């Protein structure tokens, strides 16, 4: 009898269509699908942000049942961290800039808990959304460097009808903020079009994006970066694959989005 393959989708709950897309791909590629729900405290450097993170466990369980998931792992913090962690996973080249600069310690907490979850699940494949581009790059490098025997699969962004990238944080937006938030995607599309028409200067594209998003009164730009798509290092001219990464705040919610150039 042949061994059954397994796919793993780690989440922090507040599930939406983006998560379900990960699960459907995992289902199509594996015999068994495991999902985890764990709001990891060590990747929050703001206690208020951790407290406000949406938790919809009963609704999540219904979605998982409808998606025909084989197993749910939903530990509490004491189960994942029975004692304070003395071992920290750090991928400094990929984590020190971009979101890592905005949220010190975030990626160390993320990488450490993902390592623990991958070791617990022991799945053949693990699925992550490409919206969190820096996170995905860090996880891929970490798994390679540490010989963790799970293949990491990146799944394209799932968007709302108006282009806003699906995120658990979207439910924290007010109605006015939600109506304004698609400016991120619309501006990104305009910037990509400028590049298609011949603009290769990183500074010129960042200036264009800054002007477009700044015209929306409810939007506060936290960061705009255009970096090498592979190593996340800064670029001045786009002469190889690049990643456009945006962090924009509405109220007290920071939304992220990205596109490959």
Image: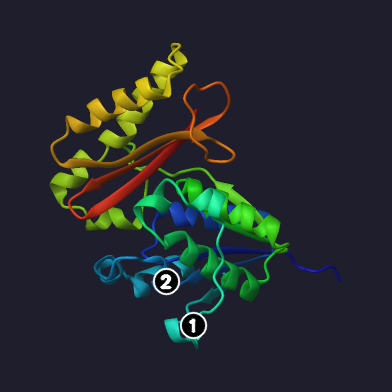
Q: Can residue 188 be seen in this snapshot? A: yes
Q: Position of residue 61 (x, y in %)?
A: 42, 72
Q: Can residue 27 be seen in this snapshot? A: no
Name the element at disc 1. Answer: loop
**Badge 2 local density, few (<14 within 10 Å), some, or many (20+)?**
many
Of residues 143 and 161, which is closer to you in this image?
143
Of residues 34 and 83, which is closer to you in this image?
83
Q: Position of residue 132 (x, y in %)?
A: 46, 49
Name the element at disc 2. Answer: helix
- How far apart are the two marked residues, 1 and 2, measured between alpha carbons? 10 Å
> Can you tell which quarter of the image residue 41 is in?
bottom left
The residue identified by callout 1 is: 81
The residue identified by callout 2 is: 42
Q: Quadrant of the N terminus?
A: bottom right
Q: Is residue 12 above or below residue 179?
A: below
Q: How many numbered circles does the render carry?
A: 2
Q: Would residue 245 be found to the left or right of residue 261 on screen?
A: left
Q: Position of residue 225 (x, y in %)?
A: 40, 36
Give the residue drawn at x 58%, y 56%.
Answer: 139
* CB atoms of marks 1 and 2 within 8 Å: yes
Give the residue drawn at x 35%, y 52%.
Answer: 102
Question: Of callouts 1 and 2, which one flags the residue occurring earlier in the amino acid sequence?
Answer: 2
Give the residue drawn at x 42%, y 61%.
Answer: 106
Disc number for residue 231: none
> Can you tell which quarter of the image residue 58 is in?
bottom left
Q: Would residue 58 be found to the left or right of residue 226 on screen?
A: left
Give the residue drawn at x 15%, y 41%.
Answer: 218
Q: Is residue 172 above or below residue 131?
A: below
**Badge 1 local density, few (<14 within 10 Å), some, or many (20+)?**
some
Q: What's the coloring here?
A: rainbow
């Amino acid at each position: 009898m042949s061994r059954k393959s397994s796919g793993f989708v780690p989440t922090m709950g507040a599930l939406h269509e983006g998560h379900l897309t990960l699960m459907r791909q995992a289902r199509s590629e594996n015999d068994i699908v495991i999902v985890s729900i764990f709001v990891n405290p060590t990747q929050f450097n703001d206690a208020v942000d951790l407290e406000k993170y949406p938790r919809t466990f009963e609704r999540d369980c219904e979605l998982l049942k409808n998606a025909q998931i084989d197993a749910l792992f939903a530990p509490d913090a004491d189960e994942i961290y029975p004692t304070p962690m003395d071992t920290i996973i750090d991928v400094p080249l990929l984590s020190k800039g971009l979101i890592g600069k905005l949220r010190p310690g975030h990626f160390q907490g993320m990488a450490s808990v993902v390592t623990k979850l991958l070791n617990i699940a022991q799945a053949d494949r693990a699925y992550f959304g490409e919206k969190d581009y820096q996170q995905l790059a860090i996880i891929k490098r970490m798994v390679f460097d540490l010989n963790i025997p799970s293949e990491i699969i990146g799944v394209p962004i799932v968007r709302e009808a108006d282009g806003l990238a699906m995120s658990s944080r979207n439910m924290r937006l007010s109605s006015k903020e939600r109506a304004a938030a698609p400016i991120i995607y619309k501006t990104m599309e305009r910037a990509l079009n400028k590049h298609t028409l011949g603009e290769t200067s990183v500074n010129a594209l960042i200036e264009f994006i800054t002007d477009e998003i700044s015209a929306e009164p409810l939007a506060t730009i936290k960061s705009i970066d255009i970096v090498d798509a592979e190593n996340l290092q800064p670029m001045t001219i786009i002469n190889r694959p690049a990643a456009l990464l945006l962090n924009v705040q509405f109220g007290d919610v920071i939304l992220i989005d990205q596109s490959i150039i």
